[in-house]
Amino acid sequence: MRKFRLAPLALAALVPILSQPAAAADRTLTIYTYESFTAEWGPGPKIEAAFEADCGCDLKWVGVADGVALLNRLKLEGDKAEAGIVLGLDTNLVEEAKATSLFEAHGLETGAVSVPGGYSDDVFIPYDYGHFAVIYDTEAVDTPPASLKELVEGDPQQKIVIQDPRTSTPGLGLLLWMKSVYGDDAAAAWETLSKRVLTVTPGWSESYGLFTSGEAPMVLSYTTSPAYHMVAEETDRYQAAEFAEGHYLQIEVAGLLANAPDKDLARQFLGFMMTPGFQNEIPTNNWMLPAAPVSIELPDAFAKLVSPQKTFLYGSAEVAENRAAWIEEWLGAMSR
Amino acid sequence: MLTRAEHRAARASGLAALLAVGLALAIPVSVLLLHGAATGLTSTQADYLLRITRFTLMQAGLSTALSLLVAIPLARALARRPAFFGRRWLVSLFAVPLGLPPLVAALGLIEVWGRNGVVNKGLGFLGAETPFSIYGLGGILLAHVFFNLPLAVRFILPALERLPSEYWKTAANLGMGGFSLFRLIEWPAMRRSAAGAAGLVFMLCATSFTLVLVLGGGPAATTLEVAIYQALRFDFDPGRAVLLAAIQIGLTLAVMLGLKLISAPSEAGSTSGGRTSRPDAPGGLRALPDAMLIGLAGLFVSAPMLAVVISGLAADLGRLLADPLFWRAAVTSLLIGLAAAMLAVLLASLLVRARYSADDAPASPALGLLSGLSGAAGSLTLLVPPVVLGAGWFLMLGGGVGQLLAPLSVIVTVNALMALPFVMRVIEPAHRSAMERNSRLALSLGITGVSRLRQIDIPALVLPLTTGFVFAVALSLGDLGAIALFGSDRIITLPWLLYQKLGSYRTDDAAGLALLLGGLTMGLMLAADRLGNRNGNKAR
């Protein structure tokens, strides 16, 4: 009979789990973002401290694997999402994000924002940008690929870790990059590249972790990634490969959810994003380029980075229209 | 032997349990089927489906072949060497992978076989150019053999050990060589067990989720189970998830019918070490091949576990134990495990009793059906694996977003169903022998109904019930399949936390967590094993 007596006990013990944690301050702002943003070495904790210093509020990050996973989560949660802001989509996803009708216009003055090619939108505000690039380990790779074509056709024994376009913005970025360069031949190019792919991870953090722990000599990341190693680790070991065809641009954005529990507070944060208080943390914590003025000087390492001669960027509408089909094409080619 | 009223009660409650199991399976499956209002497939989608289906079958086939190809000679070597040093220890060790959470094992396997692992360092030292890659098919096969080779050995070994010693004497008199021995004596003895093991291993590998998720490494190495999860969590594409689930169920159904797994009588017995002396087991140098095979197998199975312990101890366990998130995950995991185990034990007892009651009566089609269904109820979870079950509930609950109780109940139910076949296997034989022992006495004393249950039947079954319960808790603690669909920042279990740490390459934390989770489940499994053995001895 012992097993029956456990039931009320278990129920009683469930109660503390089910009850919501009490707020530390009167007002709480929950922000959905990607994992590397909230990591202890990421910008999240510093930005939280800077914002909480004068908002009289409690800022709570909720991190999911990566940017596209954020959008998936929103689609899943619909209007039950408990966040005020979603931070970490990129311009490739804004059209689809708007189509969920979960976002509402920010209504803020965005004159301070400046990104390559210019971007302004009444729903999403850019907070940083960067170019995708293949980062290689100079101790394992003698001659890095000089073009996307060389990457695709190179030695299959020399592996690269990439990300899944169904969950991550870099993964989607590479998909669009390949499409920009190869067009209708992209499927065949993916099939060739797949022999070089060690593994496909759901998010950027996983693949970069694999790369730095020596599991693969190359990884898809950003032209700015070497700055991290130069500044934080004082090493030139990891470098970005400059590709002759040009690089794909990523502009990361944040938006206000129509169901935000405290919209004023959420708007206050969106405004804060465009100030040095937020932007100062971007270059040396998120290792991306700031989308608004900073009040610090960027470390010298940033001057040594690859700066792409040509930039690719699809329009949001075009991505929204083709994303599903292109991902299917990718799945088909990669599983062959 | 039961009184008429007891029969009625046993059958009624058995029917109720069957109904509960049936509903828990039928609801999500019918939601899946109803959801799948045939969406047309593009040719790329059809190609992709075909390819992952093929891969699912291919890796399961290869995993089974590899496991069996090693298990058969290994079982023979073990049977030939009853006095081999550390043999008992090795056979007990082989019981461990069954209860080891796949995630923990994956971590250990990466430590040993990863690019920076011991094996590749050794290979590099020997001048090998290309390291062994644990990602993709290689890693999946490796992990599946790690889990299933020991299982297969534990199936086959008892069959060989049961052979009477006269066989060996006669064989020696006739001067039979190794191959004739195998063909005429060993193979006929182990054939059924080997076939049963092959069927079970194939089913387990065809529905494998966690290992493929962690070690798959991309679309080229994706099984149906993982693709179902991805269709829901990556694309939120219910149509595709439904189609994949339908293929999965069709496939497992076909395989199961083909193998008649449900009726396969062979069981992994506990082996206490053979006592028969074998004239075909020469000593000295000629024992070397056997010794090497046994040694290598022992190394292969123990190395990843050892790696988990070593790197776990090197982790900052103090910090991990101070993390409130760890405790939240631990408490959630334990509560889910306890609830799932209670449900599993309750369902299993009712089914076992109904089956006994049906078998105890003169054969009638209805009772035969009740007996058959009760017996099959446990195996149904092999047919509809956790991720497929979870997928149905996931769609029904709209992702379970913004709720806690519903997703938690789903996880509990799925875990309970997953443990049901194992729990039934523990309880059924004990129940049968207890009934045989106590029935006449109870009848003659006139103790019937609830008071008989309370005073005689349940006390006699406390040990097996507890064994099944502990076993179910351990299984549930290590499960990632159900939580992978419903896990969020609000529902976190230990495997989910470990998966996240692995995902974000907090290797140190992951190693510590793996040790804690592995230690917890292993402790429970050992306890269950102890209880089970005590129970077995008492029943005998």
Image: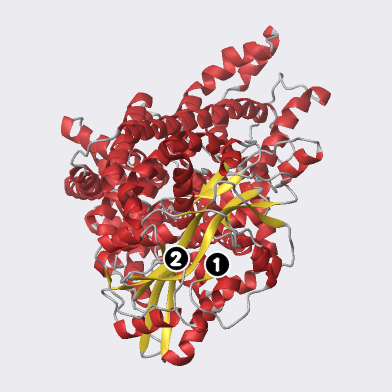
Number of on-image labels: 2
Say above or below: A159 vs A96: above
Q: Which residue is mark 1?
A: A288
Q: Residue at x 33, y 51 (%)?
A: A318
Q: Position of residue A176 (x, y in %)?
A: 44, 48
Name the kind of residue labelled 1 in the image.
Answer: Met
Crowding near pointer 2: few (<14 within 10 Å), some, many (20+)? many
Residue at 25% in and 37% down: B373
Chain under label 1? A
Mark 1 or mark 2, which has the lower sequence index? 2
Q: Quadrant of the N terminus of chain B?
A: top left
Report whether B132 appears left or right of B450: right
Name the residue type under label 2.
Glu
Whether residue B337 is situated above or below residue B67 in the rendered picture: below
Residue for badge 2: A252
Q: Are marks 1 and 2 in contact (CB under 8 Å)?
A: yes
The residue most toward the right is B284
Note whether residue A297 is visible: yes
Res B3 visible:
no
Residue drawn at x 49%, y 58% is: A249
